[in-house]
Image (spheres, rainbow, N blue to C red):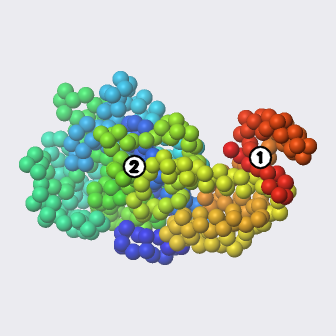
Amino acid sequence: MKLYNTLTRKTEEFEPQNPENVKIYTCGPTVYSYQHIGNYAAYVYWDTLIRALSMNGWKVNRVLNITDVGHLASDADEGEDKLEKGAAREGKTVWDIAEFYTDDFLRNFRALGLIEPNKITKATDYIEAQTSLVDKLTEKGYTYETSDGVYYDTSKFPTYADFAKLDLEKLKAGARVEFNAEKRNPSDFALWKFIKPGEQHAMRWDYLGRPGYPGWHLECSAIIHSELGEPIDIHTGGIEHIMIHHTNEVAQSEAAFDVQMSRFWLHNNHLTINGEKISKSLGNVYDFRDLAKQGFSHLDFRMWVLLGHYQAERDFNFELMQMARNKLLDYKNWVALRFQGRETDDFEAVQEEIRGSLGDNLNTSGAITALDRAVNTEKAPSEKYINFLDEALGLGLGQVSDISAEVKRKIDEREEARVAKDYARADELRVEIEEKGITVLDNASGSIWQYL
């Protein structure tokens, strides 16, 4: 299996440290609002990774985190905590906001047919692990204290710039006038933030004799150390995290534990909408409520995601979604042929091609191309092949079922009316059948039914 490793900037052969315990960590959502479709595209990509690893016979041990505290509006350790921002927006408590949007995320996660992680963790359940990590870094001389928090001194970690190929001198020269004067280096980051007198911050814990809360980067290192242990096999996330969030994770973990944090790092690219970056100011932030209004399901969206590659910048629009929906409908109607007496096939050669595509740096579009060749044959898929497709691509094709006896009776009646040239009655029955979500196609060899 080959994967592109951000750590080395190369596509490399992947072999797990332990085939019975392939350790994977996925950066999860910050639960202060509805997640947009770009967020969910990433989880479809990483679901494909899990499926590809499992198809190799390896046992995956995956952790996904929920950020429910500490993610500030600015990457410069300034601004309002996003959970506090969400609470102020909706007039609720931060705890209510976190619970509501976590539940919404998980509902959509499951509706997409994504494989459940072995463990879903919340940052607020790991406060002790996070403060212990700060203690360890302090003992080893990597931290310093300012009036607003405990900071990591990046100058103490010689390889800090390596992961993201940063130019620290350029960063230092370009530091803004409003740069925090107490920070020793522009790249230093907050491990723990103190709550200032009079500051309203509902999520707070006592540490170093003062109330405060963890910095956003800290949770991932603490959770990985607590639940998986270093080094993990694969760390996944978005490319926007490379320069700051993931760079800081590496610095924290490797300084604290003197071992490589992750052997492979996989990053998905951005999603744009009609050629523009997703932005609330542009009004082009779509979530699944918006897709549902346009008649699209979660699996329609999953189909659209699989048509591209996780490393490519993807452009989304509703015309492309309609194409994906039509393709998924074609697949469902192809599966439906097996209920209509069509000869079935296991398509073993196609299975191998799909496996090979997924093993080639998660080439889902190649897998779809191979599947299309099977769909274009005269044969229907066997139950074995449908099970394979659901295992590989998660499109829910195994959920396609036979039609009811009532609809079958109407189809037979319509065929009798058509043979008798009672076209008015045949048309009436067609309407009744289509009200059930089924249409009938007539050809020289007879009629077949399809889902609408």
Query: Which of the pair 261/241 is nearer the observer?
Result: 241
* Element under disc 1: strand
* SS of the residue under disc 2: strand
Q: Quadrant of residue 59?
A: bottom right
Q: Amino acid at mark 1?
A: Val
> Which residue does the numbered mark 1 point to in the structure image?
440
Residue 320 x, y percent position in the rendering: 50, 52
At 75% from the left and 61% from the top, the residue drawn is 381
Res 358 → quadrant: bottom right
Mark 2: few/some/many CA within 10 Å (<14, 14-19, 20+): some
Q: Earlier in the sequence, mark 1 or mark 2?
A: 2
Residue at x-position 76% and y-position 65%: 378
Give percent across and percent down for residue 83: 34, 35
Residue 115 at x, y percent in the picture: 58, 52
Left or right: 109 in relation to 423: left
Image point 19% across, 33% down: which residue?
196
The image position of residue 124, as x and y in percent, is 39, 40
Viewer-nearest residue: 219 or 414: 414
Looking at the image, residue 340 sits to the left or right of residue 64; the answer is: right
Residue with the mark numbered 2? 273
Q: Which residue corresponds to the image point at 68% horizontal and 44% vertical from the top-left?
A: 452
User: Mark 1 or mark 2, which is nearer to you?
Assistant: 1
Looking at the picture, does residue 205 appear above or below residue 43?
above
In the rendered structure, the answer to whether residue 202 lies left or right of residue 188 reads: right
The reply to whether residue 197 is in sight is yes
Q: Amino acid at mark 2?
A: Ile
Relative to 316, is 101 above or below?
above
Residue 249 visible in the displayed image = no
